[in-house]
Image: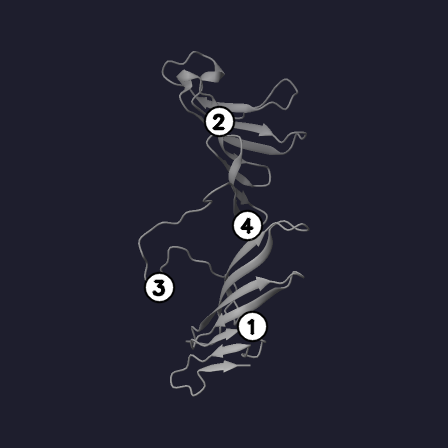
Amino acid sequence: DLILGGADGTNTASTIGHAPYNWSGSSDDLISSIEMSPVVGTQDDGVIELKTANNINTGGTLQTRLKVDNLGDISFYEDTGTTPKFFWDASAERLNLTGDGTSLSLIGATQSIVGGASNLKIGSSDVAGAGKGGQLNFTANTTSLANYPVAGIHGYHETVGAGNYSGYLSLFTTTSGGSITERLRIDSSGTVIVNNNGSGNGLIKINGATGSTEALIFQ
C-alpha cells in the first residue's frame, strides 16, 4: 500500500520519521525514525534500522537502537548507537551478548525447584533419552582458537523410562590437548564420582545410597 524508494537510480535509504511539535523542517530534528536501506554493495538485500534521539533541542541526534539485516540477524545497540551489544544470530538460533562488566543479570524472587520453577532454566529439546539435558559452558580465547570451551557444568537425564525423572550433574574441564573431560559427577542417588572412568567408578567414589557399607572408595 505504501512503497518508499529512491527514484534517482541510487541505493539510497528511505525513512519514516516522527517530528516534535516545534519541528524546524530538517531531517536532523527527527526524534525517532524507521530507516530502510539496501545492504552496502547490493541492490536486492534489505536492512531496517530503528532510531531514537535524546535531547534533540540541545544537539542530540538520531542513534541506531535496533537493526534487522537481510539474513534476519537482529542487533541491539548501546546508548551511543554505534556498537551492537546484544545480538540474535538467526542462522544459529542463538543470542550473543558482548561488553565489559556484567553482560547479563537475572534477578527475581527465589523460586521452588518443585514444578520446575527457576530464575534461569537451561534445557534440551531432544527426545527423552539418557544423557540429554542442559549445558552451561565457560569459554576463553586461546592462542589458537577464540571462545574455546575450557570448563562446563552439565545437567542430564540419567535413565530414560516411563515415570523415571532421574538426573545427574557433571563438572567438566578441558585438558591442554583440548579434550573436554568429565571430572566430577553427582548421580541421582547422591553418589559422587571423581574422574569417572565411564563405568560408574573413579579415583574417588562416595556412595550416596543410605546404609551403604562402602561409603568412601579410593580406586
SS under mark 3:
loop
- Mark positioned earlier in the residue sequence (4 or 2): 2
SS under mark 4:
loop
Residue highlighted by disc 2: 63
- Mark positioned earlier in the residue sequence (3 or 4): 4
> Image quadrant of residue 46?
top right
Kind of residue indicated by mark 3? Ile
Is 172 rendered above or below residue 70? below
Residue highlighted by disc 3: 113
Residue highlighted by disc 1: 195
Residue highlighted by disc 4: 93
Give coordinates of residue 143: x percent, y percent: 67, 49
- Mark positioned earlier in the residue sequence (4 or 1): 4
Give coordinates of residue 179: x percent, y percent: 64, 63
SS under mark 1:
loop
Q: Is residue 20 left or right of residue 127?
A: left
Kind of residue indicated by mark 4? Glu
